[in-house]
Image: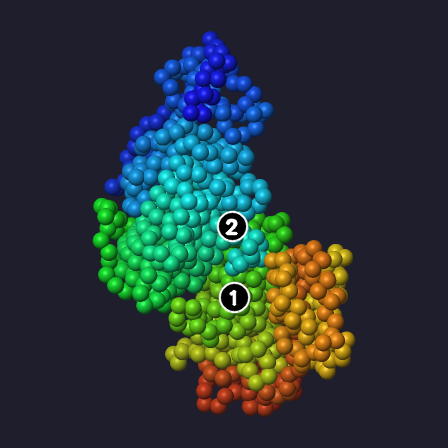
Amino acid sequence: MIIAVVLAAVAAIVPVSAAGPSIVAATTGGNVADGPEGHARGGVTTSFATATGGGLAAPAADFVATATNSGSAAGLVRSATNSDVAAELVTSPTNSDTAAELVTSPTGGGAGAGLVTGPTNSGAADGFGAGTTGGGAGVTVRATTFEQLRAFAAAADPLVVQVVGSIRVDPFGDMIPVASDKTIIGAGPGAEIVGGGLFLNGTHNVIIRNLTIRDSYIPGDFDGKSSANDNDGIRLDAADHVWIDHTRIERVGDGGIDIRKDSDHVTLSWNIVGDINKALGVGWTPNVLTRLTAHHNWIRNTVQRNWSIDNTAAAHLYNNYLENVTQYGTMSRNNARVLVEDSVFEQVNDPLVVHGTAAGLAQRRNLFTGTTGRADQAGEAFELPYAYSPDPARRVKDLVTRHAGPQWTSPSTPSTITVALDGSGDYGSLLAALGATRDAREPVTVRVTPGYYREQVRVWPSQANVTIAGPADAVIAYDLDSGGQKFYGGPLGDDAATLTLLGEGTTVRGLTVTGTAAPAVRAAGDRTVLAGTRLTGFLAGHGRSYLRDCTVAGGGDLITGTAVAVLDRCTINPASGASVTAVATPARQPYGILVVRSIVGRGPETATEPLGRTGQIVRDSAIAEAETALLGGTKQIIGQPCTAQTTTDRPGPTRQTVRKSAITETETTLLRRTKQIIGQPCTAQTTTDRPGPTRQTVRKSAITETRTVLLGQIGQIIRESATAESGTVLLGRTGQVVVRESELGPRIAAEPWLAGSGRFGEYANTGPGSGRPELTREQARRYTVGAYLGGWRPRT
């Protein structure tokens, strides 16, 4: 009714001219058989021509022309944007030329297929999402601004909305509501939504295609727990008949695609989800209603939810390629029924997991490469109500890597990538920056600026010759326990490491890397170099590693693993009763760990030096007045952490304030770090303690990332500053270990080697911790840096 009134009004006021300017004419040519065997590509050929028919003089308003059989002014629809803006006039196909840009309605029933190339089997949705037509029954509009996109997406009428260029969401993190009967499709190279996502809330019949959605991640919130970081790429709540095809979703705040609250009849095809913690989640409901088909999707460089499928009536996943997954792959939970077939899992921990006695997961003809852990199966495959023709698993990787994601893209990698928490870098997380190196053909350096980066990161086998560099106050930290259990069962083990290096030729220069109860760094690729790095533990998992001018200090045994590592000119200080090494060198492997020209167990003042020096750097920096105020408040919090408290000391009540105060999300992040700093330093405090100034400082300060960095460093200083008992540190428990030409401090035990448990040796050591029988000069010639590294000469 509204459209008809507007059409009539426009027809009365807009004259038809005798001639018009140049227009863009787009043909709707059919499928071009240039995809892989068994698939067809939907094609669009664009040509430029000069109008020879009548033309429309557009008034100063936004109009959209519908398809008509004449060149009249009828069929113009006012859009929802400001009427005083002379917007682009967009028409759908007509039988005559108009003086406006001609945007064709998509082929394949108006579903949007005509603008997407690559194999799609057909120009329409398949699987459980079959029958979804989107806005094909309506007109085609072009969105070049955020305001236009938001208005078109929420319009009541069916629309095909073509996204042109890069559209930045404002405010950052906003989820754009999408109404029913819409097609949101990228038009041409660079079509993307930046800093936000799409929200389908109770809507139906929606298509999203050929579009990139990226960069709504809030730096520092790796787990996506902040309410300000609940920024999904695409979120479905109680939506039905949705087709998401050829999209790329990267570096969003929370989930890549979340299918929630009884959404139904959904198909995901030929998408890329990557460089993110949580990829795809299904559920958030006690009901078992959702039906989902997902095929030819590429999930890469993620941590969890790949997919996590909860209470789903039928989830059919086939021909998907999961690559480089840190924690777990596809999980069936509670009452979900899942069928996984003809898919590829490469470098995926626990690729298939059944969680819950009622969960079902059937799998067949899948290909597992470089995976570890579980590949569960429970129950029988369910019957599918549709026909499909899966590609064999051996062809999936090639098909998906060539054709998934938006078309018209040509990835490239710069030689230097910068990571910064304040938004000044290329990326806000190390995980995202490393993901950007996947297409590199030459060495790449990732520069990390100062900050506290709480994230678990891997350099994957496919990423060779990557350098990660930064100053000592650039801290990479995570808080898993290698002795702990995964929430779905099984030990975390080595997978709990903060930074895992699997690629060959990886170098870490500078930086501080910490783990709570797990190795800070796990090296499992050959020719790994750590230069000037500060870390709380190192695991030699595979290949050869060379550590130069590093500091290894912390609780527990510091150097573990089965592979070869050389620590040259390093400072090493375990906690009391711990060991410098506790390795498991295979019996037939001649070399394990060599410590040479290093300082070992000198004393507690040295044990705190690396992190203490970092704290001094922070204190001495020219930081803003607010940071200085915070440092003063933090000193008040810390007080004298292990001495008797007077009635004016503050640590106890501050902990209570941390636990009980209702504070903002940013403050919560700060106080969580403060709790880690304080730990349990003192006895219970009296009610006369004074936490007030600290609480006021926290509540009133405009907290910046620099402050978070500061507290991270102070926490490390305190954790490492406990007084160590003299003469209790071991040099080795097991494995093959030689310590030579090093200074052994007073903390080294008189008998530092666990008798009968390994192949140990010392040579030319000095200091109060030395003085035991040593290798002969002839024996020592067999245990040199060159012998351990097998001819490799690392460059630091």
In this rendering, does residue 103 appear at all?
yes
Q: Which residue sits furthest front? A: 1
What residue do we see at 39% from left, 71% from top? 489
The N terminus lies in quadrant: top left
What colour scheme does the image use? rainbow
Q: In the figure, 721 relative to 726: above or below?
A: above
Q: Residues within 10 Å of mark 1 (few under 14, many from 20)?
A: many
Mark 2, residue position: 231
What residue do we see at 43% from left, 68% from top? 487
Q: Nearer the viewer, residue 527 or 167?
A: 167
- Residue 456 position, x and y percent, is 51, 62
Q: Quadrant for residue 83, please give it.
A: top right
- Residue 516 position, x and y percent, is 55, 71
Check whether the beta carbons of the residues at disc 2 and disc 1 lie within 8 A of each other. Answer: no
In this rendering, does residue 367 appear at all?
no
Q: Quadrant for residue 672, please give it.
A: bottom right
Q: Callout 1, which amino acid?
A: Thr
Q: Secondary structure at mark 1?
A: loop
Question: On residue 498, which mark appears?
Answer: 1
Q: In the figure, 706 relative to 109: above or below?
A: below
Q: CA distance from mark 2 to mark 1?
A: 24 Å
| Left or right of 574 in this view: 648 | right
- Residue 485 position, x and y percent, is 44, 72
What residue do we see at 29% from left, 38% from top? 122
Q: Residues within 10 Å of mark 2 (few under 14, many from 20)?
A: many
Q: Callout 2, which amino acid?
A: Asn
- Residue 506 position, x and y percent, is 50, 61
Q: Quadrant for residue 548, please give it.
A: bottom right
Q: Secondary structure at mark 2?
A: loop
Q: Closer to the N terminus: mark 2 or mark 1?
A: 2
The C terminus lies in quadrant: bottom right
